[in-house]
Amino acid sequence: MARCRAEATMVQAVHLAISHIHNPILFKESERITMNIETMIEFDKVKNLWAEFALTESAKKKIAEMTPYMSQSELEARLRDTTEARLLAEKLGNPPLVTLAGMQEIITIAKRGDCLTASQLEEVEKALVAVKRLKEYLCRGKQFEISLPYYEENLEALEEVREMILMQIRNGAVDDNASKLLKNIRADIERADNKMKERADSILRANKDCMSDSFSTYRNGHLCLPVKKECKFRISGSVMDKSSTGNTLFIEPTSVAKYYEELGLLRMDEEDEVRRILYELTALVAEQDVYMEQNIRMMEKLDFIFSKGKLSLEMQAVEPHINTDRRIVMKDGRHPLMDRTVCVPLQFAIGGAVQGVVITGPNTGGKTVAIKTVALNAMMAQCGLHVTCREADICMNTNYLCDIGDGQNLSENLSTFSAHIVNVLSILKQVNRDSLVIMDELGSGTDPTEGMGIAIAILEELRKSGALFLVTTHYPEVKHYAAQTKGLINARMTFDKESLKPLYQLVIGEAGESCAFYIASRLGMPKSMLKTAVQAAYGAETAKEMQEYGSLLDASEMAKTNADEMNVNFAGEKGDNRLAAPSKIKKKRQTKTQNLTEKFNLGDSVIVYPDKKIGIVCQKVNEKGVLRVQMPDKKIWINHKRVKLHVAASELYPEDYDFSIIFDSVETRKMRHQMERKYVEGQELIVEE
């Protein structure tokens, strides 16, 4: 019964809500809540998917930190990059991008004057090969006459440096042919090593009876023979090691030791020559540090650009048109994270005469997905990404403000409703004419009447701000407010009453319905329970009237319609219905109400639901299906579906009865009587509408 109270109660709720909205204490409290807009509209999930197409850490970091562009020219340039990257990926395949991980550290070492290792120089060579391949890829892309391939002019393959490294470094080491001296030194090392082995083998064969094994071995870097302990004095040389049992001694023969000394000197020469070569190559890299760092930056930049193109291909997205005229139009829009094969396309438009859209419909009908789809695609577009639509025209927004989810915060001791209000107040503090605002289940979580008032107050504040906004609600009063308020329009999510399944289609220009009684009845709720529910919501008389129609199911549908289409004018005047349903639907409603003009006569005593108060008809039903009723303390405009005939005027008053006695004040009647007799100068008769 609290759902629909008298007009005065509703007005009080609206005024109370407005006073709360402007309460500085609540505004201060709202500053404690940080809205994670990206998480609410799931842009963080889009970023995670986007990051999977990036290779470099720099690109991944840029994706994580991405925020909407505020310059139209810059945004259009970034969108053009995305479009061209997608074109190249489609025509030429994925670009040969590499991570170049650790390359900046290598360049820093070279610039510092330290020596790079052979493996580090090999990494430089591989990076330059990647740069060369990317340049070739971009050069092939110039055939499409787009600007992105000309980034190749900022890449330097440094062919001389790459070839020098390639000739002198192989398999992570300095190659023998790196220099003539190194080649000779290593040849001498090989000869000395062979002679040393030959001499050791000769001694081994000549003293077989003194040996524990038939082969020589290295111990502590020296070539040794395995000599039996009892024969140690028969082999001239130095003991380098012994076996674990002590029965075998490893002796380096004296004739072999002279070759070891020669090898030591040769390896020192080799090490010096290798170091010289490494320093020369390091110097070459250091000399090109500017180009090397430019290559790294360009590789990271192209990695970021191509990640957007790959994401567009993955999502089968399109480039949106960008405007600054506060207009959003989406044709066949869909949520980028939903399966394309099951996602129902969204047709949406806002801007111009329509500043706000109020979406209604059954639970699980797709209302939240619809507003997320609009906000998410708008944010993606302003971040330089393609959008998941067949066609889109999207305006730039200074900020995106959102209230979705129950927001319950135990650590802050906030209930669901309190969290919503604190979040909403924060939104209202930040909103401006260039904002895009989405709010889910507006005014929910509290007493329905007060929640309705707060919802309307919030809508009024948003309307005054000039922002574009989308909200979802179940309140019938809010639907009516949207239909009667300039700049607002209703929309609904469709619902299949036969299968009891939502159709996820958005219809702009029509108010939706919650279908609670209908669904409950179709799912088998007993008529007795349904009758109790209808009686609690709309009064006993309405429930009784439903039974008279013979079907509680049909009647519950009528009761639901009564609630949806109730007409309470919050300003005390007729509302502006210019932004109601499209002409096709409007014509149908006009045809339906044309026959209602004779439903009630002037002076009829009627019952006004749900409070079941008695009133008298003082103005007949108009073309909108609304009539005016004189209540004990005031006159109200009300939808004919909320009124039931109590006693006909013909039974209460004689024919040609002067109803001005009832409806006009004494002063008005007296003045009218005087003016009917003669002209009275200075007098003006104002007929109350």
Image: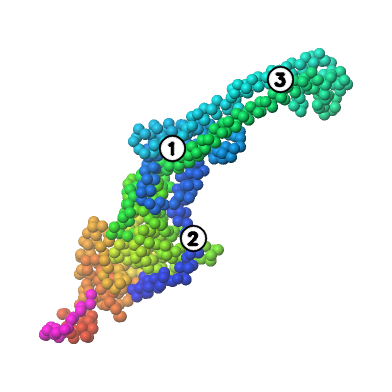
Element type at mark 1? helix
Q: Nearer the viewer, residue 323 or 503?
A: 323
Q: Which residue is mark 2?
A: 34
Q: Residue at x 25, y 73 (%)?
A: 628
For disc 3, the neighbor class at 10 Å (few under 14, some 14 to 19, many from 20) is some
Residue nearest the viewer, comparing 17 with 565:
17
Which numbered marker is on residue 154? 1
Residue 616 % position (x, y): 26, 77
Q: What's the residue type where badge 1 is placed?
A: Asn
Task: Specify the quadrant that holds the C terminus.
Answer: bottom left
Mark 2 neighbour class, 10 Å CA radius: few under 14, some 14 to 19, many 20 or more: few
Residue at 84% from the left image edge and 16% from the top image edge = 209
Q: Residue at x 75, y 22 (%)?
A: 260
When the figure is inspected, residue 362 is found, relative to residue 5, above or below; the finding is above
- Residue 463: quadrant of the picture: bottom left
Please state the extent of the stretch shown in magenta in the rendering.
Answer: 673-689
* Mark found first going from the N terminus, 2 or 3: 2
Q: Nearer the viewer, residue 421 or 225?
A: 225
Q: Position of residue 656 (x, y in %)?
A: 15, 80
Q: How far is disc 1 from disc 3 in space, using C-alphas? A: 51 Å
Q: Which secondary structure is most common in the magenta stretch? A: loop
In this rendering, is residue 431 above or below 658?
A: above
On the image, the x and y values in percent for residue 103 come to 54, 38
- Residue 17 part of the magenta segment: no
Is residue 676 covered in magenta?
Answer: yes
Residue denoted by label 3? 193
Along the viewing direction, whichever of 165 and 322 lies nearer the viewer: 165
